[in-house]
Image (cartoon, rainbow, N blue to C red):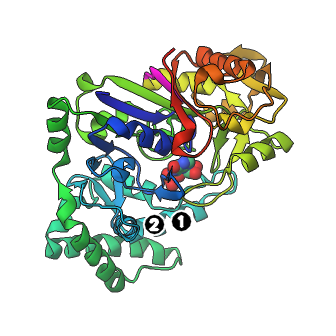
Amino acid sequence: MPVTILVGTQWGDEGKGKIIDVLTRDVDMVVRYQGGNNAGHTVEIGDNKYVLHLIPSGIFRESIINVIGNGLVVDALALQNEMQHLVERGISVKNIQLSDKAHMIMPYHCMMDRFREFQREEGKKIGTTGKGIGPAYSDKAQRCGIRALELLDLNLFKARYTEQAEKYNKIFSEAGFETLDIEASWEEVKAAAIYLTPHIKNTVVTVNEAVKANKNVLFEGAQGALLDIDHGTYPFVTSSSTTAGGACGGAGVSPRYIDDIYGVMKVYTTRVGEGPFPTELDDEVGNHMGTVGHEFGATTGRKRRCGWFDAVASRYSCMVNGVNKLALMKMDVLDQLPELKICTAYEIDGEVTKDFPSDCRALEKIVPIYETIDGWMEDTSNITKYEDLPEKAKKYLDRVAELVEADIAIISVGPRRDQTFEISK
Ligand code: IMP
C-alpha cells in the first residue's frame, strides 16, 4: 500500500475509522488533513471501543506515526483530553505530531459557533456540532487565527489569546450573550499548550520525507464529500475541504504522489444535522436502519437521519474524489429487509437527471427515481469472503459499484475488526 487517501463519500459517518484501522496493518503513517473534533471515528478492537475525534486512527498500532496536519482546526483542550484518555487506557501517544501550522480552536470559537446557530432563523440552522469549526476556519481565512506554533511562546500566545478573546467578548456582550472569562479560560488553555508542546512539529517535512522514502502513508479524511465546503450541499456543509483534493493542501503534499483513493460508503445513506437528503425515509424502514445500524452521532450523540442508497449523490462523490477503490459498509444492516431500493436518478421540476445539483433549493424539490432489488434475508454478519455472500447480496453490491463507477475493494458486515474483508474483483 503506497500513498493512499481515504475519504467518506456521503454525509460523514460512513465508518472511515474502521477501514483505516484495517488498512493500518500495512501503514507507516496516518495523516489527518482537515476538519477538527467535529469528527468522530469509532474503532472497535476486541471488546474495546474507542471514539477518536482529532487523533488519527493509526494510534492503535505502536509503530505508526500519526500526523494532525496543517489543514485542521485543533481544539487544544479537546486534543489534550483525548490524548490523556488514551494514555489512561494504556495507548501510547508518543507518535502523535501536530502541525505547527494547524489553526487552533479556542474557547471563544465554540461560543461563537453556538451563538451563530442560535441567531440563525428556523429552517436556516445548519445543525453544527458546536465545536467551533466554522469560526476557527473563518479566523484562518481572515488571517487572525492562532496557529499551533504560537503555543510555543507562552507570553506571545497569551497576548494573542487575550486580544482575540476580547474581540469576541465585545460581539457577545453587544448581543446580550454570555461572555468568556478570559483569565480563567487562559489558565486551561495554557496548561493544554504546555501539554501539547512536545508534539508540535513541522509535519509538512515529516510527511514528505515519508513519501520520498516510499513509506506507506494513509491520509484519513473526516466527514464526507457531501459536507465539503465547495462540493457539498452548501450552506449545509462543514467548513473544510473534505474531498480527496483537500489532502494535498491540508498536509502539504503534492498530488503527484497519490496512488490510490478509497471511497467509504454505507450501503444505505445517513445524514446528521440539517440540510437536504433526497432519499430520507421517515418511516419504519428508516427507523429499522437507525436501530439496527446504531445510527447515533459519535461526537454529539444525535440521531442520524436514514434513507435508501443514493447512487446519484455517491456517483458524484466518487467523481469529485477520483475514487478507484470502494469500501462498502454496514451490509448486515440490510439483512432483514425483504425489498431494497437504490436511487438511480432525480426528477426535478419534471426533468430527469443523473447529475447531482449544485443548488440546495433544487435538492429540496427532488423526487428520487428508484430501482427495486430483492433483499437477501440472511444473516451476513459472519461472512468473511465475497464468494460466500448470498447471491442477492452480491447482486446488490455489484449494482452499487456499477452505478457509482468504482470497484469494490472492501466489504464490512459488522462493527468489529474481524467483520471486514478485502476482495479483488
Ligand atoms: P460543523 O462541522 O460542526 O460546522 O457542522 C456542519 C455540518 O456538518 C452539520 O450538519 C454537522 O452535523 C455536520 N458534520 C460535521 N462533522 C460531522 C461528522 O463527522 N459526521 C457527520 N456529520 C458531520
- 2 and 1 marks in contact (CB < 8 Å): yes
Give the tally of numbered discs: 2
Where does residue 45 sit, x and y in percent of width and height? 49, 52
Q: Is residue 357 visible from the viewing direction of this image?
A: no
Crowd band around label 1 with a 10 angstrom C-alpha radius: few (<14), some (14–19), many (20+): some
Q: Which mark is residue 239?
A: none
Q: Secondary structure at mark 1?
A: helix
**Frontmost residue, 108 versus 255:** 255
Q: Which mark is residue 114?
A: 1
Q: Is residue 353 visible from the viewing direction of this image?
A: yes
Q: Which portion, as a residue range, is magenta?
A: 322-328
Picture residue at 69% right of the left edge, 37% below the top: 332
Q: Which amino acid is tagged 2?
A: Cys
| Residue 215 location, quadrant | top left
Q: Which mark is residue 110?
A: 2
Q: Is residue 237 left or right of residue 160?
A: right
Where does residue 34 sit, x and y in percent of width and height? 37, 45
Picture residue at 59% right of the left edge, 18% below the top: 401
**Frontmost residue, 15 versus 350:** 15
Picture residue at 72% right of the left edge, 18% below the top: 391
Q: Is residue 66 left or right of residue 268?
A: left
The answer to whether residue 32 is magenta is: no
Where does residue 221 sit, x and y in percent of width and height? 42, 40
Where does residue 419 sit, x and y in percent of width and height? 57, 39
Crowd band around label 2 with a 10 angstrom C-alpha radius: few (<14), some (14–19), many (20+): some
| Residue 213 location, quadrant | top left
Q: Is residue 51 left or right of residue 258?
A: right
**Frontmost residue, 119 versus 202:** 202
Q: Which amino acid is tagged 1?
A: Arg
Q: Secondary structure at mark 2?
A: helix
